[in-house]
Amino acid sequence: MMKIAVASENGMVTEHFGHCESFTIFDTEKNQIIKSETIANPGHKPGFLPNFLNDKGVNVIISGGMGSGAIDIFNEKGIEVIVGARGDAKAVAELYLQGSLKSTGSVCHEHQYHDECGN
């Protein structure tokens, strides 16, 4: 089984990982989604969310954009990071399972301007 977390808001991928409303977590088996749950973002604190999602058993994180510090922590934990994603959270997770979703490497540099991620 693999767990895919998507930084989301109202079922859509959010532009910035740390400021998302929630995480939609998809449990998958044999490249199929078998279960999903949405958990509220417990808060944006440097270094906290990668550890929080690691504790939830997440193997892959998908977001519109993400800061380099979070990417580094996910990489240290062996969690695959996909950034640059857009659209419906479930559809994006399914694209990942099909091997059709690739990371654009969109790194956020200006956290105080969270609407500018992905530029």
Image (cartoon, rainbow, N blue to C red):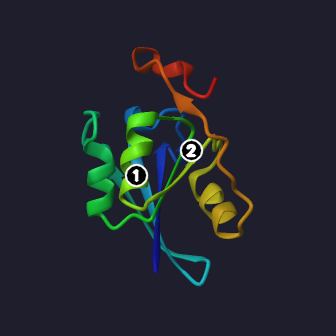
SS for callout 1? helix
For disc 1, the neighbor class at 10 Å (few under 14, some 14 to 19, many from 20) is many
Residue at label 2?
Answer: 12
The residue sitting at 40% across, 51% down in the picture is: 74
Say which mark, if any, is on residue 74. Answer: 1
Residue positioned 25% across, 43% down in the render? 48
Which x, y percent locates residue 31?
A: 62, 78
Closer to us: 72 or 107? 72
Q: Position of residue 62 (x, y in %)?
A: 53, 51
Q: x and y percent of residue 27 in the render?
A: 46, 72
> Is 6 situated left or right of 112 in this image?
right
Query: Does residue 11 appear in this view?
Result: yes
| Residue 33, horizontal then vertical, whole percent | 55, 74
Residue 20 in view (yes/no): no
Looking at the picture, which amino acid does disc 1 mark? Answer: Phe
User: Residue type at mark 2?
Assistant: Met
Q: Secondary structure at mark 2?
A: strand
Q: Earlier in the sequence, mark 2 or mark 1?
A: 2
